[in-house]
């Protein structure tokens, strides 16, 4: 059963933590891809989550798969929810990390937070992931620096950075998702594993708890302590073990 990975906003193939991808790939066939207009993929990036979900479905079917598991991180989790709801026969199980339901509290503020962090990062010469994905604590700062080192491990055939037009489209899509009528998700009948850090400032952690409550067949990983949006990267060993156990069950 292939495991399809859906990346966060502004992310390309090289933004997946190698410890997470390699850990999952030790026992599963893992496929990461850049959606339309992202990284090395051609075309124009849709400015709705639904449009991105439809592209993901076309990608999966183009590979000839009749059924897959999905793992969506942040914006990728928004996409995974739509795919699971609209294509119940295509999706067997779904993993949702650092994400929330449509209309979730504070999600419409994600674009503004990302822009502010990017500007501040450019002025201070610090990667914005350090403030967006990790807590401003000793443990959080240490975990953030460790992730940045891991993201540089692959040196050959690195993916292209997201273009400005594609980023604008993603920002618009995320804001629209955050301002939609809250979804009840009762139609998503697939088993779902839901995870996050306990101090996510991007997609506030209460959304993770809310998401798990809305999904009829969900399993909530206890929120990772001293962790934010990148909690699954900070606690990659625990997360990979839980994810594999969930997929194999």
Image (tube, rainbow, N blue to C red):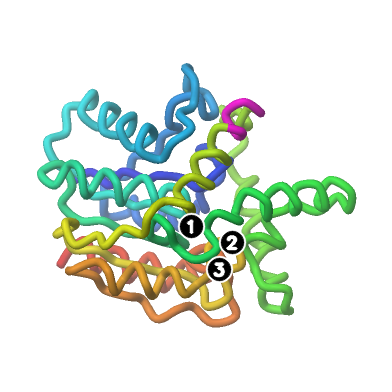
Q: Which mark is residue 19?
A: 1
Within-10-Å neighbours for mark 1: few <14, some 14–19, many 20+: some
Q: Residue at x 55, y 68 (%)?
A: 234
Q: CA distance from mark 1 to mark 3?
A: 10 Å
Q: Nearer the viewer, mark 1 or mark 2?
A: 2
Count neighbours of disc 2 (C-alpha within 10 A) and say few if under 14, some if 14 to 19, many if 20 or more.
many
The residue stretch that appears in magenta: 164-168
Query: Gap between marks 1 and 2, in whole Å?
Result: 22 Å
**Residue 85 place in picture, x, y as percent:** 21, 49
Q: Residue at x 27, y 69 (%)?
A: 214
User: Which disc, if any, is residue 234?
Assistant: 3
**Can you give x and y, in whole percent of width and height, for residue 75 in the image?**
46, 49
Residue displayed at 48% across by 53% down: 178
> Residue 17 at x, y = what percent?
52, 53
Residue reaching furthest to the right: 123
Q: Which residue is mark 2?
A: 202
């Amino acid at each position: 059963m292939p495991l399809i990975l859906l990346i966060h906003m502004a992310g390309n193939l090289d933004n997946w933590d190698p410890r997470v991808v390699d850990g999952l790939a030790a026992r599963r066939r893992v496929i990461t891809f850049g959606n339309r207009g992202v990284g090395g993929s051609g075309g124009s990036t849709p400015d709705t989550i639904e449009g991105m979900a439809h592209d993901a479905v076309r990608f999966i079917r183009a590979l000839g798969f009749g059924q897959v598991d999905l793992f969506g991180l942040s914006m990728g989790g928004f996409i995974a929810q739509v795919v699971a709801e609209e294509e119940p026969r295509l999706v067997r199980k779904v993993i949702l990390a650092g994400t929330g339901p449509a209309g979730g509290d504070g999600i419409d503020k994600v674009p503004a937070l990302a822009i502010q962090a990017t500007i501040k990062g450019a002025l201070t010469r610090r990667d914005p992931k350090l403030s967006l994905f990790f807590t401003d604590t000793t443990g959080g700062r240490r975990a953030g620096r460790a992730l940045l080192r891991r993201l540089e491990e692959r040196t050959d055939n690195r993916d292209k950075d997201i273009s400005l037009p594609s980023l604008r489209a993603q920002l618009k899509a995320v804001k629209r998702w955050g301002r939609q009528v809250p979804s009840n998700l009762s139609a998503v009948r697939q088993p779902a594993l839901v995870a996050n850090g306990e101090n996510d400032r991007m997609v506030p952690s209460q959304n993770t708890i809310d998401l798990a409550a809305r999904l009829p067949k969900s399993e909530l990983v206890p929120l990772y302590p001293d962790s934010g949006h990148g909690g699954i990267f900070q606690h990659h060993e625990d997360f990979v073990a839980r994810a594999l156990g969930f997929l194999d069950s």
